[in-house]
Image (spheres, rainbow, N blue to C red):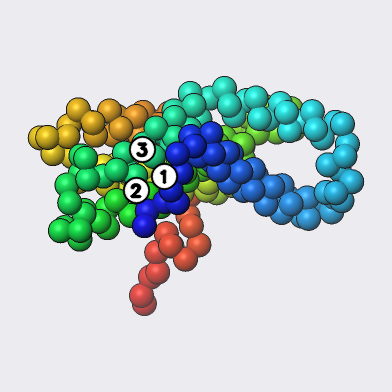
Amino acid sequence: MFLEDSDDPMGDALLAVAESFAEAKAMLEERAEEMGIDLEAAMNDPEIEEEMRRSSETVRSEEASKLAIKYSLETRALLDNPETWAGDAEEDPIIADTLEVLCYYLFSVAVKVQSSFNAALDTDGNYEAEQISHPQSYANGTAKITLIILERSILGWTYLMSENNTAVVRPVIEQLERIRHLLEKKFPNARDFIRPGFDEIETIM
């Protein structure tokens, strides 16, 4: 089973939005706790609501955000019916595993791309130079994870591409590559982010 069955594309869109909001909320709660802010009281503040609106508009205006949402929604149908283009997953465990990976990351593409942009914004909805330039910023950390998800997705689609389905798969790969390019352009230092426990280099004396 790759994803829950659904014939409602609007439901898919709402799922992606819900996941995005959940992540944004968790990030906001973490920052509020660090700053000693009563988040519940702040959420009823009209000024806070206006700040959130500005940030949302900025994130939604990014081409990468639009393409990521389009990818998550439009490729759902392909992944729900892989037998029409990818081959028999029941006969080839590698195809089955690759489809599983693509499905696992399907909505994460849209969620993480938007989270990357959102993490770099100030309260006025403008990008903070330090969040973009500092390799260890939260925004660059989020962007690095997003790039990893994009690259794993690109590899998956590339593996599944054949002479018979190039017309179907190639546009999907190009879309993901475009998203990756735009994210790298916005966050040129993202790959320098060191993930604790993952990217650290241990020196053996």
Q: Position of residue 23 (x, y in %)?
A: 62, 48
The residue nearer to you, when weighing 40 against 136, is 40
Label whose residue precedes the other's in the sequence (3 or 2) = 3
Q: Nearer the viewer, mark 3 or mark 1?
A: 3
Q: Secondary structure at mark 3?
A: helix
Residue 41 shows up from this direction: yes
The disc labelled 3 sits on which kind of residue? Ala
Residue at the location (62% across, 25% down)?
58
Whether residues under marks 1 and 2 lie with C-beta atoms below 8 angstroms apart, the answer is yes
Label annotation for residue 102: 2
Q: Position of residue 182 (x, y in %)?
A: 43, 28
Q: Residues within 10 Å of mark 2 (few under 14, many from 20)?
A: many
The residue nearer to you, when weighing 88 against 66, is 88
Residue 133 shows up from this direction: no
Image quadrant assignment for residue 68: top left
The disc labelled 2 sits on which kind of residue? Leu
Q: Residues within 10 Å of mark 3 (few under 14, many from 20)?
A: few
Q: Which residue is mark 1?
A: 106
Residue at the location (44% across, 35% down)?
73
* 196, above or below 182, in the image: below
